[in-house]
């Protein structure tokens, strides 16, 4: 897909959300088909999703010295990140991601 097309639909999806209008009304007012907006919402959401996480398990037969964790940073595509410092409420993690 062309970058301009992605930018156009990203803008339209953002406008629809900000407008407070239903998808049907928003699309009717702009001469769009509502199924197109729903399809692009899905594409954009999937493009932002983290596809997989790779982890390596350590051998726990002999405990290694562990330094205290001060900050955890989760980096997402397009330069977005989440920094969790001590006291971070893990219940908010899913909402933020």
Image (tube, helix red, strand yellow):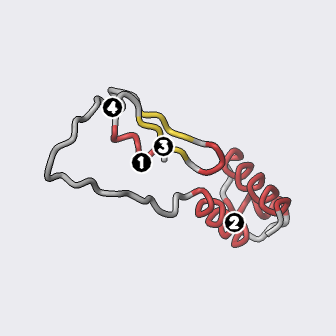
Residue receiving disc 2: 40
Q: Secondary structure at mark 2?
A: helix
Q: Secondary structure at mark 1?
A: helix
Quadrant of the image occupied by residue 69: top left
Q: Which mark is residue 69?
A: 4
Residue 18, horizontal then vertical, whole percent? 69, 44
Q: CA distance from mark 2 to mark 3?
A: 26 Å
Q: Which mark is residue 94?
A: 1
Residue situated furthest left in the rendering: 61
Packing grade of label 2 (10 A; few <14, some 14-19, many >=20) is some
Q: Which mark is residue 23?
A: none
Packing grade of label 1 (10 A; few <14, some 14-19, many >=20) is few
Residue 46, horizontal then vertical, whole percent? 59, 63
User: In this view of the protein, which residue sits in the foreground, 37 or 46?
Assistant: 46
Q: CA distance from mark 3 to mark 1?
A: 12 Å
Q: Earlier in the sequence, mark 3 or mark 1?
A: 3
Q: Residue at x 82, y 60 (%)?
A: 3
Packing grade of label 4 (10 A; few <14, some 14-19, many >=20) is few
């Amino acid at each position: 897909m062309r970058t301009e097309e992605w930018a156009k639909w990203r803008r339209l999806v953002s406008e629809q959300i900000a407008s407070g209008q239903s998808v049907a009304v928003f699309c009717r007012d702009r001469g769009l088909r509502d199924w197109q907006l729903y399809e692009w919402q899905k594409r954009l959401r999937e493009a932002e999703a983290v596809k997989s996480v790779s982890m390596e398990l350590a051998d726990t037969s002999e405990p290694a010295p562990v330094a205290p964790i001060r900050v955890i940073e989760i980096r997402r595509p397009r330069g977005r990140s989440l920094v969790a410092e001590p006291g971070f409420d893990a219940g908010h993690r899913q909402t933020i991601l």
